[in-house]
Amino acid sequence: MAVTTYSSTSVRFRQKTTTRWLVRGLGVLILALVAWRVVTVGLAEGYPATFWMSQLINGLVLGGVYALVALGYTLVYGILLMINFAHGDVMMIGGFTGFFALQFFMALGWLQGPAALVALALILIVAAGMFGSVLTGVTLERVAYRPLRGAPRLVPLISAIGASLFLQYSVLLIFGVSPRVYQKPALIEGGFRAGGVFVPYTGLIIFVTSLFLMLMLYLIVQRTKLGRAMRAVAEDKGTAALMGIDVDRVIVFTFILGSALAGAAGVMLGFHNTVVKFNSGFIPGLKAFTAAVLGGIGNIPGAMVGALLLGVIEAIGPSALGIPTEYKDIIAFTVLVLILIFRPSGLLGEVVSEKRA
Amino acid sequence: MLLPSVQRGLRIGAIAFAILTYLVLVGLPLRLGDLALPILAGAMALFFWLALRGGKSKQDVFNRQPALLFTAGLSGGLTAGLLIAALLAVFVNLTSSGVRLQPIFDKMTPPNLAALYGVAPGAIVGGELSPLAWLQQALLLTVASGVGAALVLVERWARGRPTPRISALRWIPLLLPIALFLFVLWLGMPGVTFGGNNRGTIRLLAAMVTIGAGILALRAAHPGRERQLLSLLYLAGVAYLPFTLDQFQNSVLGIVFIFVMMGLGLNIVVGFAGLLDLGYVAFFAIGAYMYAFLSAPFSSPWLSAQLQSLGIPANAPLLSFWMALPITMLAGWIGGVLLGIPVLRLRGDYLAIVTLGFGEIIRLFMLNLAELTNGPRGLLNIAPPYLFGYNLGNPRDIFILGLIGSAVIAFSAYRLDNSRLGRAWIAMREDQDVAQATGVNLVRTKLLAFAIGALFAALAGQLYAARQTNIFPENFSLFVSIDALSLVIVGGMGSIPGVVLGALALKGLPEVLRGVDEYRIVTFAALLVTMMIVRPEGIIPSTRRRRELHEEAEPVVGEDVPSVLERLAPELKSDNPDGGKK
């Protein structure tokens, strides 16, 4: 894992032994309570196994989308040590661009054509979404973040919050309040049954595409020259610059990568939720951030694992705990808080909540 | 040398084009009406001025030679003008050939386009625009860029001259608020017809400017007897304001000062202690709901059932406003500590996200715990405050209560800032580890910051509930937190007068300028980003904060008191503290 860990050295926070054991004990207690609740309430409801399976599939599909967004957070955090608060909204812009591309191909009649044409159109729609997001992400970096490099840490964060609101409400003003409805092409409507569990085609496509894009990202970061430069900059900006790496260019490239993934996620989330509107990036963005923290922020495999895990927790959580589904957002936030308290390093990462800028 | 300046012009022109396109897409021309074209051109002239003057260094060749400056400016204006004219032509052609743009772009209606061209909407639909109208756009922007370039020259010329120092000028900012106050009084006199239908709005605006100018004047005054005298004068003036303003004006200022109370509390958490709290609305909500439970228990199904089983009639308030005060304060305090404990170990951005999550959790609970909070139907018929039998629920008295509350909180915040605890907060904000090493008890200091901040927010919440008499979960959305945060940041983090100024600007102005409400959040957002880039320390920075963010030499205290005008002029410095490792 040493090769893929994507953050610089950190200062480990030393606690008194008693406090540490107290915190650990509390963590175990909470886990035990959750387990008790699951056994006594969730399992006692007596849902069939196929129900849990289909929830699991839902969770994995959603987790795949979250993973793409979470990677954007992780990449930027790894290099700039900054939470790109507007990343969820970059994703939303990708969703909008993808929607207009979808309308365009619908008007051309490609989506009613033969399978090959539909596939090509779908790829182009995702590409359009990626393009829209990349444009937004790069502009954002140039306008709102680059002038603040080296400022105290609160400053770029506030700027990012401003940028997030600006993107959301600009979209509201430009495109209006009414949500845009993604219409699926007839070809990918429906699904198939595997062992009594219904698997929708869109879910399968989303999951496979996410895995493919993650693999591409992994290859870019690990195997290309720019990827090596990215890792070098993440390790130490100053030294990287001395080695002849153009740090600004690498940062822009990082934003391009992250935004492209977010754009693809935006389009796929559009197909998954069937609608996209001005604030539809906000909550998924927060959840993707949760996923990135869950896996250990700054850590690429961590973001993927964390996102899949969070997707599954969110999908089966309400039924397993026997609480109404309206509370599923609360589950994600609670997971975030608990992770930050009990294991700030995330599942695969090192301690970062105490890291110094 | 000519080619680079043209290149620079093209770049500036492209940015101007992007900005203009944005403004057209969000429907600003429609909002501005007949004046759309001149206002946009004026704004563009300002933009060109800022873009052209912003050379990185003094050696910037474009700033030396007027010819190159104008080449850059005019080529930029021409680029922007031609591009925007072409884009608008496309829109007009699409509209006139029957394509409905509205399903895609919400604001691209014929009236919007027509406002920009200065023609009737019918001309757009019918496609009756002459090429002249298109040329007009291009020419106007070129002229605007020329004006911008000229402004750069004028500015440089003015900078080169020694500034005259007339000591009597110092009295202008000091006496300005008094003049404004008299203006407000004069407007309120019967028989004055100044301003016609807009008299009330002008009066409200003038009243708000008076308060703002008073704060700036106090800062410009010499410390000592002069400042004491002025503050007494202003205090008397502000205390008199509620009795002369009408209901609407009082109610606007009432909400402004409720936000001042809240902002002062957030200022402790964010400004003093450096803990970025994005879920601050949670404490505001705790205060409001706590008072609502105590005052209108009959609105909550669960509470009224409980009370009935205890044999207490549930159709009247349990406690009066004043009796409820300590309880809401205690609730705020406990809420702050409860939120503080889990986030003790978090810093900066993590803290922001977690507190944001907490704010949302509280709101979701208010929405879904219908048994206790009556869900989205809200808690109704909350009692206003009474004093010796007098109902203090009218806008005037709420404004007075807001003023008193703000004064009390501001005084406490001021005393805290200069206390041992305040210094511990600042030490913690600067460097947590060093603070701990020098003996600051981090747990206690952090929890106190959260608790005191939350207490003030709960107070504001109680006053808010008493003002509204009905409260609903949507009153406590994330945007209340964002509003409070923006006013603290715009005013100046850690600065007490800054909060008042920020609240007047961000809560008061949108209330006055009706119709721009649609653009409120976008403007805030743009303001937040711009503020962070241009002047991260806020309008009235606290001295410490300014030193921190601008590390260049500061004038020695007492040597030279900068005038108000100097303070107000945002120094558009491009010298960010450059990326030195911290």
Image (cartoon, coloured by chain):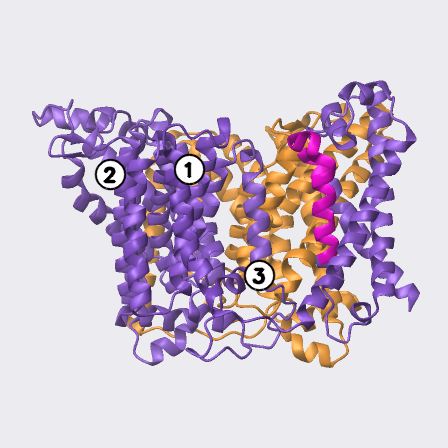
Chain colours: A orange, B purple
Region in magenta: B23-49
User: Where is residue A48 drawn, in percent x and y?
Assistant: 47, 29
Which quarter of the rendering shows the C terminus of chain B?
A: bottom right
Residue B192 versus residue B2 in the image, above or below: above
**Label at residue B570:** 3
Task: Mark 2: give few (<14), some (14-19) or many (20+) Cα within 10 Å.
Answer: many
Identified by mark 1, the residue type is Ala
Residue A242: x %, y % from top left: 72, 81
Q: Are marks 1 and 3 on the same chain?
A: no
Q: Chain of mark 2?
A: B
Q: Amino acid at mark 2?
A: Met
> Where does the image place residue A216, in percent across and percent down from the top left?
75, 55
Determine which of the numbered discs, if any, sits on residue A320 in the image: 1
Q: Extreme left residue here? A: B311
> Is residue A205 visible in the rendered structure shown here?
no
The disc placed on residue A348 is: none
Residue that label 2 marks: B290
Q: Position of residue B177 (x, y in %)?
A: 41, 52
Q: Tell me if residue B30 is in the magenta stretch.
A: yes
> What amino acid does circle 3 point to?
Pro
